[in-house]
Amino acid sequence: MSEINISYLGGGVMFLLALATTLYSIGGRANGRIFRRLLSPLTLSLTFSAVSLFLRVWQPLLLIVCGIFFVEMTLGYGVGKEGTFSAIIPKWVKRILISLLVLCAGLLCVFCFGKGVYLLLIQGLVALTTVVFAFRSPLPASIEEILVCFLNNGIILFFPFVK
């Protein structure tokens, strides 16, 4: 595949990632759970699968990565409503759990593709940055959600490109 075509494909991935992060943020608002729990992970899953198929690196085990997108989007990562189980677990613990889940997806990509360890290390560092926002975020909640979704999932979508 030519470099220009790879650039178009990468740009398409970024566009769909932007859509998924926006859906994720919308899902954090009142009555928006379908956006966060269904539409955002569906967008990520279809993007990841389509790129993997297009680049001819798709394997059935990669469906687990798609499942991880859905699990990740259903886990609460914020403070939680008072009186719920989610409110008992500290915010930073939730962020670490989500980061570990995302790292499992990256590790599975390394296993399936047989390469990408350096990308996994970068993903680990980036995932840890989302934990920092649990302690203090200079951003409004809706923008923080876009950034957290982008940081947690952006690198995974680029594993199929690893040579």
Image: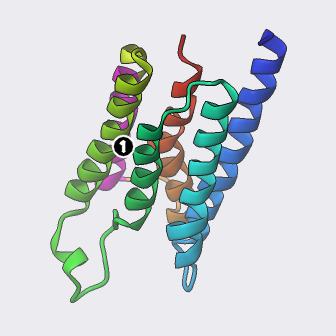
Vertical placement of residue 148 versus 53, above or below: below
Residue at horizontal 24 percent and vertical 48 percent from the top: 96
Q: Nearer the viewer, residue 66 or 137?
A: 66
150 sits left or right of 15 in the view: left
Magenta segment main secondary structure: helix
Q: Quadrant of residue 104?
A: top left
130 sits left or right of 52 in the view: left
Vertical placement of residue 161 versus 18, above or below: above
Magenta region includes residue 64: no
Mark 1 crowd level (few <14, some 14–19, many ≥20, 10 Å Cα): many
Residue 125 % position (x, y):
34, 28
Vertical placement of residue 141 versus 63, above or below: below
Magenta region includes residue 130: yes
Residue at horizontal 36 percent and vertical 16 percent from the top: 117
Residue at the far left in the pictured view? 88
Residue at horizontal 31 percent and vertical 51 percent from the top: 98
Residue type, numbered disc 1: Val
Q: Quadrant of residue 35?
A: bottom right
Q: Nearer the viewer, residue 113 or 94?
A: 113
Residue at the far bottom in the pictured view? 83
Residue at horizontal 40 percent and vertical 26 percent from the top: 112
Bounds of the magenta segment: 120-136
Vertical placement of residue 114 versus 80, above or below: above
Q: Which residue is mark 1?
A: 102
121 sits left or right of 149 in the view: left
Residue 73 % position (x, y):
44, 61
